[in-house]
Image (cartoon, grey):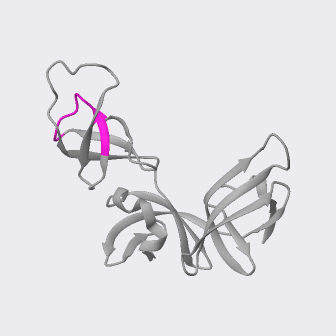
Amino acid sequence: MVSVIASNVRKGNVIDKDGKLYVVLTAENIHPGKGTPVTQLEMRRISDGVKINERYKTTDSLEKAFIDERTHNYLYQDGDQFVFMDPETFDQIHVPRSVVGDAEPYLIENMEVRLAAHNGVPISIELPARATFEVVDTEPAMKGQTASGSFKPAKLSNGVRTMVPTHIVTGTRVVVLTADGSYVERAKD
């Protein structure tokens, strides 16, 4: 364990609170006009998935747990488990759906991810910032609808709905941000 001040806690850190491990989902430092600055943390208890919100003074000391973070390749889904492989040792690790969370639709076979584990138990997953998917359904472009900056809804091959520029048609491969599914650019492949 190592002590850190609350204002230095970041998303993905693992905190030991009362002997239980919590993964930080969001960390926000709030500096009101008057009063003491505080750090607002939204955390998920690793053992049972319960989410909590905590407020700390930015100078409060928290216990940060040591985490083993490694690159793994995503292999396949097996029921409620996702199977990843360590590319160096070829060991396979099963990660529960509760740990994968919102990242599930963005997992692509052989995708490299950062997998964090504490005492061999997977606790969080970090995807690459961008992923490429095919547009499987979108409205055709309307004649005269050429204003730059105008978007239309589209459904991607991973089932996620997003907004794409009007010139994008069904079958086009696009790059999206894995954090929120927003359109970045047309794929260059």
Residue 137 horizontal side relative to residue 13, left or right: left
Whether 166 is among the magenta residues is yes
Q: Nearer the viewer, residue 87 or 126?
A: 126
Q: On the rendered image, what quadrant is the C terminus found in?
A: top left
Q: Nearer the viewer, residue 50 or 46?
A: 50
Number of on-image labels: 0
> Residue 97 placed where, x, y %?
42, 73
Q: Is residue 48 above or below residue 41?
A: below
113 over 94 or under it: above or below:
above
Query: Left or right: where does residue 27 sit relative to residue 113?
Result: right
At x 65%, y 69%, the residue is 67
| Quadrant of res 171 | top left
Residue depicted at x 42% and y 60%: 103
Instruction: Judge whether residue 74 can be spotted in this image.
Output: yes
Quarter the N terminus occupies: bottom right
Residue that extends furthest to the front in the rendered view of this protein: 34
Measured as percent of width and height from the top left, residue 126 is found at: 51, 58
Image location of residue 61, percent across then percent down: 84, 63
The answer to if 150 sits in the magenta stretch is no
Q: Which residues are magenta?
A: 162-171
Say above or below: 28 vs 17. above
Residue 187 appears anywhere in the view: no
Q: Residue at x 30, y 52 (%)?
A: 160
Q: Main secondary structure of the magenta part?
A: loop
Is residue 123 rendered to the left or right of residue 59? left
The residue depicted at 43 percent of the width and 61 percent of the height is 102
Horizontally, is 138 left or right of 48 in the view?
A: left
Above-or-below relation of 49 to 166: below
